[in-house]
Amino acid sequence: MQQAQIDRLRSAVIPAQQLFVGGRSTQASGNARLDVVSPIDGRVLTTIADGDATDIDLAVSRARQAFEQGTWSRAAPAQRKKVLLKFAELIEQHALEIAVLGVRDNGTEIGMAYKAEPLSAAGTIRYYAEAVDKVYGEIAPTSGDVLGLVHREPLGVVGVIVPWNFPLMIGAWKIGPALAAGNSVVVKPPELASLTLLRLAELASEAGLPDGVLNVVTGRGASAGEALALHMDVDALAFTGSGAVGRRLLECSARSNLKRVHLELGGKSPNIVFADVPDIKQAAKVSANGIFRNSGQVCVAGSRLLVQSAIYERFMDELLQVTAKLRVGDPLELTSDIGAISSHAQLRKNLDAVARAEEQGATRLAGGEQIRIESGGNFMVPAILADVTPAMDLWREEVFGPVLAVTRFERQEEAVGLANATPYGLASAVWTGSLSRAHRMVRAVRAGVVHVNTYGGADITVPLGGFRQSGFGRDKSLHALDAYTDLKTAWIAL
């Protein structure tokens, strides 16, 4: 990846986008359009169709038709594997084009976007392609005159709703296992970042995925998203996003056909540094990246930092030095460490969170102001606020921006109490040189992921999901296939 290649792609004209239904680009039922505004400079890149319930109904109908025809749902696992491997290959071939398209859409720094979006998506699709012909049913331990078999079958039509921070990566976590299991899929992309998922559907069709098996309907959550959640012919819904929307989707399931709903929601993840941390400099560097990468717009971001008092001053000095060196700039420049905030509304929310924390008694140590205003884009200096207590909003509420809440602790028991003083439980981290303490903390911290002496980096082989109000869905790993298959028992008298 070279800057000259990026510069050639960044100025490409993006035509007005349509829906992708039944294997082809399709006009929406109405004439409504949504502007795609780049967070880099505030300019309109293109428009997307503002799909509604009529468009969702058409997409679900095409998906159901494809499922019942059985070209995909009843295809031999080896055949599905072949198509999905070709799909992954095409994503990789177009990786830079897709990455630049996504950065223009949502502002993620290109170095991160290239790996986390197209390359990660390709790896995910390939992982489930390789798994599909290696997952077996079961033979039950019955008496000799009975044969008990447990079959895995695809659910049917799966709805997928993904967020704007990593639409391709998170989309692939759901689309990959759903397709591998033999389902048809209808995706409702985020209004703020739809372009890469539309391109993904085109590549899937080029790879040989039958028409109607993967459909993409753009539009607003209140219209297209809710219509998908309420649809009586959708068998399951997979969602990553906010708790408020997650609750709404559960209500929609209850009001419609009791479709399965898999939710991966927000987080307020604790990053706990003990005095016996093996390498303070490394811990500070990784901790900064753990909250400030992608401008803090990461569901598992380590947004609460807990540092043991004995090393508090040393650690904070290192952290402030690392943070000061991070370059906030044009996300399509390889020299930028941090890109743009996804929207002006999100930027405003971030700035307000910093101001409110100071009003409640927190001490701002760094950042927290808007910069590059003349560019027309949404840029912010990463903020570090110390002396944050569990009584403050910044300790409890997810900001989803580059805003770090810091406090100190004395004892392990105090750290556990502070870490768990949140309604969330998505991710966490523990830094220690003690193996026994690491194991004790893994058990004590209420989170779906506990990193030890690192933050982030867990690959497709392990599940991702949370406890409590971080939801109950699990993306990644072979466990994800459970969300997209039904178990059927065959009880055969011999």
Image (tube, rainbow, N blue to C red):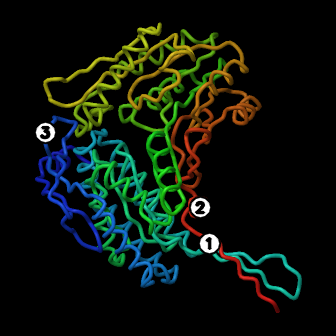
Amino acid carrying mark 1 in the image: Val
Is 36 in front, or is 453? 36
* Residue in the image at 33% along x and 53% along y: 189
Is 211 in front, or is 85? 211
Establish if 400 lies above or below 307. below
In the picture, the disc for residue 135 is 1
**Eye-nearest disc, 3 or 2:** 3
* Element marked by disc 3: loop
* Residue in the image at 45% along x and 26% along y: 288
* Element marked by disc 2: helix
- Looking at marks 3 and 2 on the same chain, the residue that comes earlier in the sequence is marked by 3
Local packing at callout 2 (Cα closer than 10 Å; few below 14, some 14-19, many 20+) is some
Q: Are marks 1 and 2 in contact (CB under 8 Å)?
A: yes
Amino acid carrying mark 2 in the image: Leu
- Looking at marks 1 and 2 on the same chain, the residue that comes earlier in the sequence is marked by 1
Q: Name the residue under label 2.
A: 478
Q: In which quarter of the image is residue 70?
A: bottom left
Could you give the CA–CA distance between mark 3 and mark 2, rounded to whole angstroms?
A: 41 Å
In the picture, the disc for residue 146 is none
Establish if 292 lies above or below 24. above
Could you give the CA–CA distance between mark 1 and mark 2, rounded to whole angstroms?
A: 9 Å
- Looking at marks 3 and 1 on the same chain, the residue that comes earlier in the sequence is marked by 3
In the picture, the disc for residue 43 is 3
Residue lying at the far front in this picture: please name it.
255
Q: Quadrant of the C terminus?
A: bottom right
In the rendering, at what x and y percent does residue 389 appear? 55, 14
Q: Quadrant of residue 341?
A: top left
Local packing at callout 1 (Cα closer than 10 Å; few below 14, some 14-19, many 20+) is few
Establish if 383 lies above or below 92. above
Is 78 in front, or is 417? 417
